[in-house]
Structure formats: C-alpha cells, structure tokens
Image (cartoon, grey):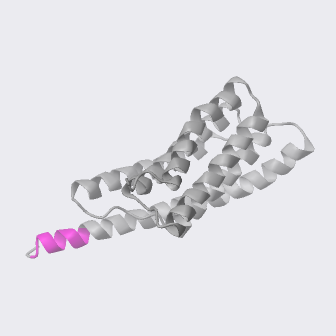
C-alpha cells in the first residue's frame, strides 16, 4: 500500500479543501459562525494529523511537506480575511509573511544543496497553534458585543504570543539551516 495514502494526510488535504470554503463564508456571506467552525476544524485537523501520524506510524514525506504547507496557506488566507474584515492591521501580515519568506528561501537553499530540511519543532507547532486559536477569536471580535470584547482580549493574547513564538522559532530554524550549510561547506571544502 502507498505510504502517502493515510488518514493523517487525508486530514491535511481536508484542511486545504476548507480554505476556499472558509473564505467564502467569512468574506462573501459573512456567516461568521460557519467561518469560525471551519477555522476550528482546521485547528483540530492540524493537531490530529501529526498526532495520528506518529501514533499510528503513518509518517510520510508527503505528510512532512503537506502539513506545513497547509498551515502556511491557511494562515495566509485567514490573515487576508481578517485584514479585509478589519480585525488585524497590515503589520501582522507583513511580519508573518517576512518570517515565512525567509524560511522558504532557506528551505530552497537546503534542498538545492541536498541537505536535510528543517524539522518542525514543538515550539514551532505551538506558534502555529496559538495563531490558529487566535484567528477565530479575532473574527468573533469584529462583532460589537460583550462576546466580541472578550474574544478581542483573548484573541489578541493568543495572537501576540503566537507572533512572538513564530518569530522566535523562525530565528531558530534559520540558525539551524545556516549551521547545516556551514557544516556541509566544511565537509565538502576541507581546505577552506
């Protein structure tokens, strides 16, 4: 049986399929209960796909690539929706995109050099989880109500913590990538 056909990878695909549905309900229909439910399901599937892959020994190269790609696309789509709904400022998008762009370049360099790609750490997952927890709350915060005010405070708590962890782990990933490149350079060019 193909190692890439498994439940964890199916959950990652499900998360990807939910992106246009989320955008439709959040921006076109402005049916926030459905949009928030989709975000919550995305967060649950993000947690479950990795947990199940390890527990059931169903890890795969496709899953290792698909999970972080699905996370990045979901985060980008959600940031755009939140910006359009005036729930976040542009600086949030720029900071998170800058981190992802730098790491994408590092990943490309590692791949071109045939080096091992950076593995997602527990803190990296925690950063993503904080953002995924923040997003539904920030969407709820767009409503003028007591629930909206509470969601605003809790949502920004998760968002700021998530952004800080996201930047911190980005720095760690970048340093690890540079370390791999330096070690590889020394072993391939021992005279330098």
Residue extending furthest toward the right: 146
Residue 180 against residue 77 in the figure, above or below: below
On the image, the x and y values in percent for residue 191 come to: 8, 75
SS majority, magenta: helix
For the residue pair 141 and 23, the one nearer the viewer reads as 23
For image coordinates 38% across by 50% down, the residue present is 104
**Looking at the rendering, in which quadrant would you find the C terminus?**
bottom left
The answer to whether residue 1 is left or right of residue 115 is: right
Q: Quadrant of residue 111?
A: bottom left
**Looking at the rendering, in which quadrant would you find the N terminus?**
bottom left
The answer to whether residue 57 is left or right of residue 140 is: left
The answer to whether residue 136 is left or right of residue 93 is: right
For the residue pair 28 and 64, the one nearer the viewer reads as 64
For image coordinates 26% across by 66% down, the residue present is 181
Residue 187 against residue 23 in the figure, above or below: below
For the residue pair 41 and 6, the one nearer the viewer reads as 6
């Amino acid at each position: 049986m193909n190692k890439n056909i498994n439940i964890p990878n199916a959950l990652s695909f499900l998360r990807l399929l939910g992106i246009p549905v989320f955008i439709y309900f959040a921006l076109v229909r402005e049916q926030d209960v459905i949009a928030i439910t989709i975000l919550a399901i995305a967060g649950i599937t993000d947690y479950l796909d990795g947990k199940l892959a390890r527990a059931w020994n169903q890890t795969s190269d496709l899953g290792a690539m698909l999970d972080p790609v699905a996370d990045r696309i979901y985060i980008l789509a959600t940031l755009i929706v939140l910006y359009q709904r005036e729930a976040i400022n542009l600086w949030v998008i720029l900071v998170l995109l800058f981190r992802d762009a730098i790491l994408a370049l590092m990943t490309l360099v590692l791949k071109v050099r045939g080096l091992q790609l950076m593995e997602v750490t527990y803190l990296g997952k925690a950063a993503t989880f904080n953002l995924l927890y923040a997003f539904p709350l920030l969407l709820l915060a767009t409503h003028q109500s007591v629930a909206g005010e509470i969601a605003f405070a809790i949502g920004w708590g998760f968002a700021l913590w998530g952004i800080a962890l996201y930047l911190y782990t980005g720095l760690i990933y970048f340093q690890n990538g540079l370390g791999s490149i330096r070690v590889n350079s020394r072993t391939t060019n021992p005279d330098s």
